[in-house]
């Protein structure tokens, strides 16, 4: 899959590398801004089974 993506991208290897890094940054930004906050409403990270003072 990654080799196919690398072959599809235009330009020499250093331009391909820049494109891949920009795409990776865009995906990570989308995850942090939209996906993780949406998932957070379904997962309650503050719930615990350990009582206070233990």
Image: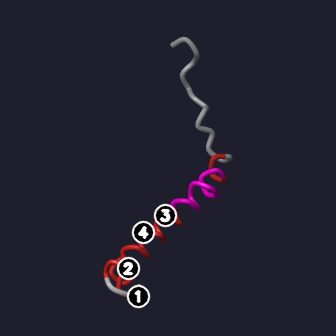
For residue 27, which numbered disc appears in the image? none
Residue plotted at (62% across, 55% down): 33
Residue plotted at (60% across, 32% down): 46
In this rendering, the answer to whether 21 lies above or below 36 is below
Residue plotted at (58% across, 62% down): 30
Mark 1 and mark 4 lie on one chain; the one further toward the N terminus is 1
Q: Residues within 10 Å of mark 2 (few under 14, many from 20)?
A: some
In this rendering, the answer to whether 43 lies above or below 38 is above
The residues bearing labels 2 and 4 have C-alpha atoms spaced at a distance of: 9 Å
User: Magenta residues?
Assistant: 28-37
**Which residue is the site of mark 3?**
25
Mark 2 and mark 3 lie on one chain; the one further toward the N terminus is 2
The residues bearing labels 2 and 3 have C-alpha atoms spaced at a distance of: 14 Å
Verify CB contact (< 8 Å) between mark 2 and mark 3.
Answer: no
**Which residue is the site of mark 4?**
21
**Circle 4 SS class:** helix
**Which residue is the site of mark 1?**
10
**Circle 3 SS class:** helix
**Circle 1 SS class:** loop
Dominant SS in magenta? helix
Residue plotted at (63% across, 52% down): 39
**Which residue is the site of mark 2?**
16
Depth check: give the residue in front, 37 or 17.
Answer: 17
Provide residue 25's location: percent of width, then percent of height.
49, 64
């Amino acid at each position: 899959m990654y080799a196919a993506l690398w072959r599809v991208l235009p330009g020499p290897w250093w331009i391909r590398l820049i494109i891949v890094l920009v795409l990776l940054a865009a995906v990570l930004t989308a995850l942090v801004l939209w996906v993780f906050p949406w998932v957070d409403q379904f997962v309650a990270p503050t719930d615990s089974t350990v009582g206070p003072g233990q």
